[in-house]
Image: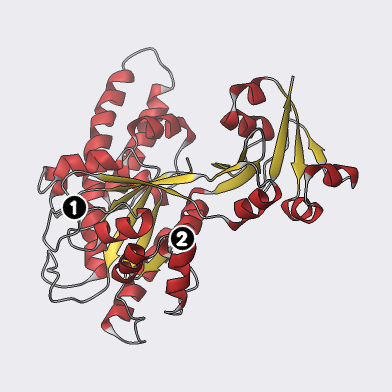
């Protein structure tokens, strides 16, 4: 699995449409609030031309891509932190994802009612973020109460944890998402334990209309507003023509065919391609490849992962009994046409326990 994204946003911004674009799972789409009551879940193979090239070298092996999971969470409304709308159900579902994909409506359509009566991207983002912050404020306040009790015990580090936690609580109360704040080391484990909503990495999907917006148009202004907010948060924006891609997805039978259709509209990549790249950058992930046994396979790990830990992703023996990793450049392997001539040409590098996996590595693990 690559990572899990939770699609969040106000009702009727097109979350389920975007979900269908990304996962091709056929989630129900209607133009009234709370059409999505229970979370829809879709798993999609990550398109990767590098894996395709590697599979061409080993045509008798099964190609196994890495996957992403998308969770289309019920629409959030103002005062959700107090239980309005789907309220607490929505907020609890966010805790389970690796990253938040905030879908923001940019398109105008009189047939699709906006829950607040008008399209205003900055306002809509503010509503969602306020509800997430209010829920975090509730969570952090509850933990602070527990930490105050711990300072009465014998744990000498309890005071430092409480001070750091209360400083964080003050920042959240001031409206600052945790993901934008430095975290004191003494409370890192508490952050992991409590999983605050605004601590999760977040990127924005701008749901735009079928036709590219002209400069100075209302839609262009909405997109600019989202980009400005994303820059302030150190995040990014992925514009997706939701309805157009959804319609193409209904007639195209493969990722390649969808990309071909989109090319007719001047779009070089699908929404999935764009979001995958943005998500990997956001979460600082890399992909490596193996061709062991009957499979040619892609694996996703955090950047900075060492060879033994990467091997442990495949099987615990590769971590516990690691001897070395053989690193093969993909381009050279494809050029050689098979593993044997690559080895004979001396293009296989041996790496030890300290080797940090690079994006695109083809690796053979050797264990005792």
Query: Is 142 or 253 nearer to us in this picture?
Result: 253
Query: Is 131 or 349 nearer to us in this picture?
Result: 349
- Left or right, 168 with reference to 277: left
Q: Which mark is residue 255?
A: 2
Residue 137 appearing in the image: no
Q: Which mark is residue 325?
A: none
| Residue 41: x %, y % from top left | 30, 44
* Element type where label 1 sits in the image: loop
Q: Which mark is residue 76?
A: 1
| Residue 236: x %, y % from top left | 43, 62
| Mark with earlier residue (2, 1) | 1
CA distance for labels 2 and 1: 31 Å
How many dots with numbers? 2
| Mark 2, other Cα within 10 Å: few <14 / some 14–19 / many ≥20 | some
Colouring convention used in this rendered image of the protein: secondary structure
Quadrant (top left/top right/bottom left/bottom right) for the C terminus = top right
* Element type where label 2 sits in the image: helix
Residue 31's quadrant in the figure?
bottom left
Residue with the most extreme front position? 60
Query: Is 334 or 326 nearer to us in this picture?
Result: 334
Q: Nearer the viewer, mark 2 or mark 1?
A: 2
Say above or below: 9 vs 292. below
Q: Residue at x 66, y 25 (%)?
A: 318
Q: Residue at x 40, y 59 (%)?
A: 233
| Mark 1, other Cα within 10 Å: few <14 / some 14–19 / many ≥20 | many
Say above or below: 8 vs 123. above
Q: Residue at x 40, y 43 (%)?
A: 98
Residue 161 appearing in the image: yes
| Residue 50: x %, y % from top left | 63, 54
| Residue 140: x %, y % from top left | 28, 36
Q: Residue at x 79, y 53 (%)?
A: 332
């Amino acid at each position: 699995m690559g990572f899990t994204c939770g699609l969040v946003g106000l009702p009727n911004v097109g979350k389920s449409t975007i979900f269908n674009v990304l996962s091709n799972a056929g989630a129900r789409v209607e133009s009234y609030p709370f059409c999505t009551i229970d979370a829809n879940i879709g798993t999609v193979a990550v398109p990767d031309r590098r894996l395709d090239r590697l599979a061409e070298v080993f045509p008798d092996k099964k190609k196994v891509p890495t996957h992403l999971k998308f969770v289309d969470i019920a629409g959030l409304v103002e005062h959700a932190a107090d239980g309005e709308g789907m309220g607490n159900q929505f907020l609890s579902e966010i805790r389970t994802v690796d990253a938040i994909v905030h879908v923001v409506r940019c398109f105008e359509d009189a047939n699709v009612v906006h829950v607040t009566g008008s399209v205003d991207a900055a306002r809509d983002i503010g509503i969602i973020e306020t509800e997430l912050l209010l829920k975090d404020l509730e969570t952090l306040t509850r933990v602070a109460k527990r930490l105050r009790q711990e300072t009465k015990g014998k744990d000498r580090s309890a005071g430092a944890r409480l001070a750091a936690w209360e400083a964080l609580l003050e920042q959240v109360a001031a409206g600052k998402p945790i993901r934008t704040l430095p975290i004191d080391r003494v409370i890192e484990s508490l952050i992991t334990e409590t999983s605050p909503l605004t601590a999760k990495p977040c990127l924005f999907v701008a749901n735009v209309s079928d036709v590219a917006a002209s400069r100075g148009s209302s839609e262009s202004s909405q997109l600019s507003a989202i980009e400005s907010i994303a820059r302030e948060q150190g995040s990014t924006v992925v514009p997706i023509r939701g309805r157009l891609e959804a319609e193409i997805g209904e007639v195209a039978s493969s990722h390649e065919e969808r990309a071909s259709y989109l090319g007719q509209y001047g779009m070089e990549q699908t929404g999935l391609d764009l979001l995958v790249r943005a998500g990997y950058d956001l979460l600082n992930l890399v992909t490596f490849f193996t061709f062991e046994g009957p499979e040619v396979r892609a694996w996703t790990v955090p950047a900075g992962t060492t060879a033994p830990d990467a091997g442990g992703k495949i099987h615990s023996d590769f971590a516990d009994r690691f001897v070395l990793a053989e690193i093969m450049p993909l381009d050279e392997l494809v050029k050689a046409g098979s593993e044997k001539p690559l080895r004979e040409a001396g293009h296989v590098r041996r790496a030890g326990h300290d080797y940090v996996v690079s994006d695109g590595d083809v690796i053979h693990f050797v264990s005792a």
